[in-house]
Image (spheres, rainbow, N blue to C red):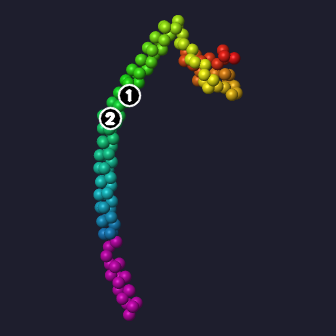
């Protein structure tokens, strides 16, 4: 009897077409895909506006501020050079400044030595 019930149930379920279940899944897939596309378009538009209307103006404002600060610094250095005969005054000789325990492989100056700004350690020896 049990065999007859299982056999009838299998036959009844096989009678329904299998494609109906997949059609419902495909419809929900396309709906989800469309929702994701719409969300992506909205998010892209938001970040485009943030970039153009917030980030770029902020960068320009920061560039102007840094330019003004550096121009003031350069003007101050030029004033100091005028006051001291064309050279910047010597910094104080503190023992913890420019301390060299062992020489660099390329000499006494640092790798990024700039004679206009840094003290020349080759002359100190």
Would residue 85 be seen by someone viewing this image from the given angle? yes
Q: Nearer the viewer, residue 63 or 7?
A: 63
The residue mark sitting in front, 2 or 1, is 1
Question: At 32% across and 73% down in the image, what residue appears?
Answer: 17
Question: At 33% across and 48% down in the image, what residue appears?
Answer: 40
Label 2 CA crowd tier, 10 Å (few <14, some 14–19, many 20+): few
Farthest-out residue, bottom? 1
Question: At 54% across and 18% down in the image, what residue appears?
Answer: 117
The part of the image, by quadrant, that contains residue 61 is top left
Q: Which residue is mark 2?
A: 54
Q: Position of residue 34 (x, y in %)?
A: 30, 53
**Is residue 49 placed above or below 77 in the rendered structure?**
below
Q: Position of residue 56 (x, y in %)?
A: 35, 31
Q: Position of residue 11 (x, y in %)?
A: 35, 82
Label 1 CA crowd tier, 10 Å (few <14, some 14–19, many 20+): few
Q: Which residue is mark 1?
A: 62
Mark 2 residue element: helix
* Secondary structure that dominates the magenta span: helix
Would residue 110 be seen by someone viewing this image from the given angle? no
Left or right relative to 119: residue 71: left
Which segment is the magenta one?
Answer: 1-18
Q: Name the mark on residue 116.
A: none
Q: Quadrant of the N terminus?
A: bottom left
Is 25 a magenta residue?
A: no
């Amino acid at each position: 009897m049990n065999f007859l019930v299982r056999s009838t149930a299998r036959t009844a379920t096989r009678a329904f077409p299998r494609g109906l279940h997949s059609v419902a899944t495909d419809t929900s897939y396309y709906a989800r895909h469309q929702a994701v596309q719409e969300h992506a378009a909205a998010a892209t538009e938001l970040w485009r506006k943030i970039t153009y209307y917030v980030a770029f103006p902020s960068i320009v404002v920061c560039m102007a501020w840094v330019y003004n600060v550096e121009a003031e610094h350069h003007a101050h250095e030029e004033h100091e050079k005028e006051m001291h005969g064309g050279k910047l005054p010597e910094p104080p000789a503190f023992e913890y400044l420019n301390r060299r325990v062992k020489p660099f492989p390329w000499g006494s100056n640092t790798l990024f030595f700039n004679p206009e700004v840094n003290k020349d350690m080759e002359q100190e020896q």
